[in-house]
Image: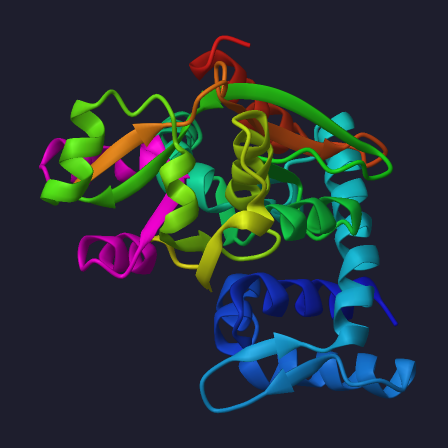
Amino acid sequence: MNLKQLEAFVKVVETGSFSKAAKELYLTQPTVSAHISALEKELKVRLFIRNTKEVTMSDAGQDLYKYAKQMFELECQIAEHFNIRGRNSSNHSITIAASTIPAQYLLPDVLMMFKKLYPKEQFKLIETDSSQVVSHIVDGMADVGFTGTVLEKKYCRYIPFYKDKLSIITPNTEKYRALQEDGGDEIFWLKGEHVILREEGSGTRKEAQKQLKKAGIDMGELDIIASIDNQETIKRSVRQGMGVSILSRLATEEEVQEGHMLAFPIPKSDAGRDINLVYNKNTPMTANVERFIKIIKDIYNI
C-alpha cells in the first residue's frame, strides 16, 4: 500500500468515476484501476461496487475512506505549514454534508461567495438527512456539515448560524382559508387531517415533533399517511389535496406568496429552530476548511 494508491482511491470516491479521477490526477484510467486493484488485493476486500451507471463504495471502502481522507488532510496541513504549494495542498476538495434545508436554501449563497474568493478551490456537496450529516462528520466522511438537529455525538461541535421557522402548510381552499380567517392560533384541527411528513431522520420531522408537543399535540395523535424524503413531492401532494404537512418556511415561501398554498404558524414555537454548522473538533482542519467556515461566520454574523 502506498500514497499513490490511496490518492487514486480517494479521487474515485470524491469524483464518483474512475475516468474523472484519472483526469484530475493526470493519469490514465487503466493506471487508476490498477491502483485500486492493488489495494483490493492487499487488503483482501472489495472497495467499490461497480455497475454501468455509477461507482459506489462498499462497506470496506467506506472504512478505508475514513482513514485515507485523514491522511491526505494531514498531508495538506504539513504542506501548508511549510509553505509547500504542491498538487495536494492547493487542490484539496472540501466535502460538505448538508440536510435538505441548508443545502437548498442557505448554502448556494455561501458556495457562490467561496468560489468568488477562492476560484481554484473545489468542493463536494452531499445532501442527506440530518442524522446522516452527523454520521458523516463523526466518521470523517465530510469536513463540515449543516443540520437542523443537534444529535449528541462524540467529538461534534455545533455552531448555530440561522433561525428557521416551521409552518403547517395546506392547500389554498375555502376550508383552510376559513381556518385562517378565524385566526389559526389553535391547531388542534390538525388531528383531523391527513398528514404528510418528511422521512425518519429528517431534522424537519424531529423539530416538527418538538414544536407540536409544545403546542399540545402528540405526533402519535396524527393521521400520518406518508413519509416522503423529497420536499418538492410533499409540496405537490399538498397542493393537489392529498393532505397537509409541516415544512420549513424557507421551503414554502414562494408557493405561499404565489397563493398556491396556505401557511399556519405553530403556536409556542418561539424563534424557531437552529440551523447548525457542525464539525469534528478532533479532526485537524485544513486552511481551506477554515476559510470556508469563516465565510459562513461573516455572512451570518456569528
Image: 261 above or below 298: below
Name the residue located 57 percent from the left edge and 72 percent from the top edge.
Answer: 27
Magenta span: predominant SS is helix
For this view, does 228 lie left or right of residue 68? left
Q: Nearer the viewer, residue 298 or 136?
A: 136
For this view, does 211 lie left or right of residue 233? right
Q: What segment carries the magenta color?
A: 232-259
Image: 143 above or below 51: above
Residue 14, image x, y percentages: 58, 61
Quadrant location, the N terminus: bottom right
Residue 272, image x, y percentages: 49, 21
Residue 298, image x, y percentages: 48, 12
Residue 150 occupies quadrant: top right
Image: 101 above or below 181: below
Tell me, yes or no, if residue 154 can be seen here.
yes
Q: Nearer the viewer, residue 238 or 16?
A: 238
Residue furthest top as drawn: 301
Residue 194 occupies quadrant: bottom left
